[in-house]
Amino acid sequence: MADWISIGDVKQRLGVAETAKGYEDVDVQSRIARAQKRIKAKLQATISIDTIEGWDTDTVPPIVAEWTADLSAAYILSDYGGQALLDKTTLAGSLFNKVEIDLEALRLGKIQIVDTTNESVEATVDLISSNTQNKTSQHSMNHPSDSDFGDGTLDEL
């Protein structure tokens, strides 16, 4: 998967914590990958995986890039600054909470993602289907077919 943001995008959110760091760019890069995995997992509930996999630094929707940078910074602050992700009074907790609230709002349909061309990113299509017209049971694995008990019963199984 291509990166959605740069290391500089994350460092920008760290502010003064960037100067007293104790971590290298490779550490930031691993937090970007971690953030992208989490966000991708949440987005798959509403957006096609093919669409998500096609994003890179040039095509990722701005809000997704923002979430990725915020979450990456939260991971850095948590891992290297000792800030708790679930403590909303810390910068790490504040960034983490903001991303989680937005992702939940997206899942509930309260917000939409707009791509770099100002078009809404299409929601995934639900492919689950069922047939309520067929009342006859379908047997497999060498189970006996219906007999005197009538169509759709499992009495003899």
Image: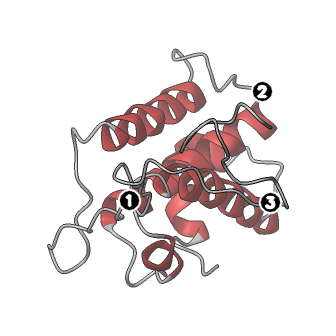
Of callouts 2 and 3, the N-terminal one: 3
Q: Is residue 139 above or below residue 122?
A: above
Q: Residue at x 63, y 35 (%)?
A: 149
The residue labelled by disc 1 is: 126
Q: Indicate left or right for 79 with 12 as reference.
A: right
Q: Which residue is tagged 3?
A: 27
Expressed as whole percent of the image width and height from the top left, the position of residue 54 reads: 48, 84
Q: Counting residues from the N terminus, which is met first, the one under dot 2 or under dot 1?
A: 2
Which residue is pictured at 69% across the width and 63% down the height? 33
The amino acid pointed to by label 3 is Asp
Residue 6 image position (x, y, % from top left): 55, 72
The answer to whether 105 is drawn above or below residue 139 in the figure is: above
Q: Answer with mark 1 or mark 3, whichever residue precedes in sequence.
A: 3
Measured in 3D between alpha carbons, the distance from the residue under mark 2 to the one under mark 3, in whole angstroms, is 15 Å
Say which amino acid is labelled 1. Asp
Q: Quadrant of residue 60?
A: bottom left
Crowd class of label 2 (few under 14; some 14 to 19; many from 20; radius 10 Å) = few
Q: Which image quadrant: the N terminus?
A: bottom right
Label number found at residue 82: 2
- Nearest to viewer (mark 1 / mark 3): 1
Q: Residues within 10 Å of mark 1 (few under 14, many from 20)?
A: few
**Cα–Cα gap, marks 1 and 3:** 38 Å
